Image (cartoon, grey):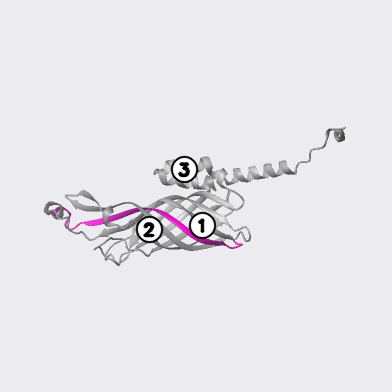
Amino acid sequence: MKKILLIVFAFFCISTAQSQVLISLIFGDKLNSEFLEFGLEGGANFSTISNMGSSALNPGFNLGFYFDFRSRKNPAWMINTGVIVKSPMGAKEIPVYSLNDENLDNTFAGGHVNREIRYFNVPILIKYQFKNNIYLKTGPQFGLLAKAFDEFKNEINKDDVVYKKNIRDQIHVIDAGLAFGAGYHMNVGNGLNITVQYYYGLVTVMKGDGPNNQYNRSLYVTAGIPIGKGKAAQKRAEKEAELNKVVLPEDEKN
């Protein structure tokens, strides 16, 4: 358990995806066991913010790590958790609003705004896997705000003009909602997980006087790859073989 807590803490402290992959490769076999699967998970997500008028989906890429804690009484039941380290949310093509600067307002009149909000997301889901390897999962998901900005864009004389506005102080630091999904555990290698999951936010995105009816929505399409599972299984098999080995006394050998 101490090893798991140390890895979780390390992932929160390291911001780059490269470091995440490196740590996973180093510690993967130490975290996998008969009732615990650890791995990397990533893919595409398509986000929007409800009640924003003419906004469009914001496509992005997500990357994180996961744990499947299997029940010892019935291994078909699991707790699926982890951290989605890279998980952009937001919406595209939001109508332009005033920047309280006449020059900027004139520059971006007729353009649009892309809003991107980045969280560290932690799902805590109940997962059930059927005998045909199809699984369902659902439960709460919590998000910790990392950064947020509005990107103003317009085309002037066939050139793109871009301006980024930091809006982090306008966004709630904690996000929370419900996640539910379905997937398939492929019998390839150590078991590739293909998942489609939807997040339905229940905490308003904006603080204070901001709109109180806007919530995060996101569709995830991901692939999960166990890290070190084969090596961990090999170590268990070798240990079991050692325990089952019969060593005869010296006098019986003769």
Q: Which residue is mark 3?
A: 21
Q: Amino acid at mark 3?
A: Val
Q: Is residue 88 left or right of residue 108?
A: right
Q: Which mark is residue 46?
A: 2
Q: Which residue is mark 1?
A: 80
Specify the segment rendered in magenta.
106-132
From the viewer's perspective, is the residue at label 2 or at label 1 nearer? 1
Q: Mark 3 or mark 2, which is nearer the start of the sequence? A: 3
Magenta stretch: residue 120 in it?
yes
Report the magenta stretch's main SS. strand
Counting from the top left corner in percent of width and height, residue 151 is at 25, 52
Q: Amino acid at mark 2?
A: Phe
Task: Assess whether mark 3 and mark 2 are in contact (beta carbons under 8 angstroms).
Answer: no
Query: Splitting the image into 4 quarters, where does residue 102 fall?
Result: bottom left
Query: Splitting the image into 4 quarters, where does residue 175 fall?
Result: bottom left
Q: Mark 3 or mark 1, which is nearer the start of the sequence? A: 3
